[in-house]
Image (cartoon, rainbow, N blue to C red):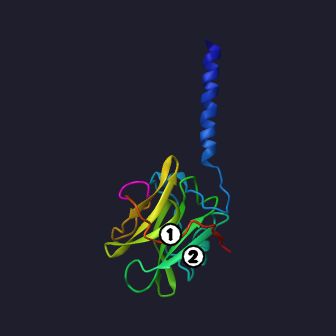
Amino acid sequence: MKPKLFIAAFLATVLVSGTLAGCKKEKSTSEPAGAPTSEATGEASAQPEEAVVQDSAASWIASNYKDMGKLLYATADTDLDGDGTPEVLAYVGGPMMCGTGGCNLVVLKREGGDLRKVSELSVVQLPVGVLDSKSNGWRDLAVTIAGGGVAEHAVRLQYDGKGYPRNPTVAPAQETDSLGTVLIPAEPLKPVE
């Protein structure tokens, strides 16, 4: 009886260790990876300072994520709020920014010559699009989600008057059949320099 108990305990330890090791697996930097698991649950985590603003998305990313190691990114400009000035969508990747569910998508608003963070979404995969529909005066975003047991599909994210939902894998995100106009395609990210 004791050998069976020992084998069961050993197998349980191996299973748990393998599961935890998988959480830290890094993906190739030539393709987008996933996002941190703490954000996948919607829990608060250390966030970059929102007061830090820069004149370009790359410098904003470098300033706000300076302690996150190697960073990769892709950006797109589009007018989300209808004020005639395009906002910046910045998809930020790297070993410390991604997990199996995706990377972070940051929505930045131009104010004068500066950029201010409006929203930061976790667990986003590429491609990222924008829909013609609006919520609270801002265009709805369409992002791809997948990983962690979730089959790849697109979801619609609505602006709630303050920002877009942080986690697109849970409500209020709504499944959609279309990405609308694709702004950030599923292509390799470039390094932040």
**In percent of the image, x 68 and y 58: which residue is there?**
28
Residue that protrudes farthest toward the left in the picture: 136
Give the amino acid at mark 2. Trp
Queried whether the magenta region covers residue 168, the answer comes back as yes
Residue located at (59% from left, 40% from top): 19
Name the one closer to the observer, 193 or 180.
180
* 115 sits left or right of 140 in the view: right
Q: Residue at x 44, y 66 (%)?
A: 179
The magenta span reads 167-173
Return the residue at label 1: 106
Question: Which element carries disc 1, helix, strand or loop?
Answer: strand
Residue 161 percent coordinates (x, y): 33, 71
Secondary element at tag 2? helix
Residue 75 within the magenta-colored segment of the rendering: no
Amino acid type of the residue tagged 1 in the rendering: Val
Reading the image, the residue beneath label 2 is: 60
| Above or below: residue 107 compared with residue 32 | below
Does residue 24 appear left or right of residue 161 in this picture? right
User: In the visual, does 39 lie left or right of 177?
Assistant: right
Residue 66 makes an appearance in the image:
no
Task: Work out which residue is located at the far top of the displayed protein and give it.
Answer: 1
The image quadrant of residue 3 is: top right
- The nearer-to-camera label among 2 and 1 is 1
- Disc 2 crowd rating (10 Å Cα; few below 14, some 14-19, many 20+) is many
Question: Please, is residue 164 above or below residue 2 in the view?
Answer: below
Q: Residues within 10 Å of mark 1 (few under 14, many from 20)?
A: many
Q: Quadrant of the C terminus?
A: bottom right
In what quadrant of the picture does the N terminus appear?
top right
Q: Is residue 143 visible?
A: yes
Residue in view at x 35 percent, y 58 percent: 172
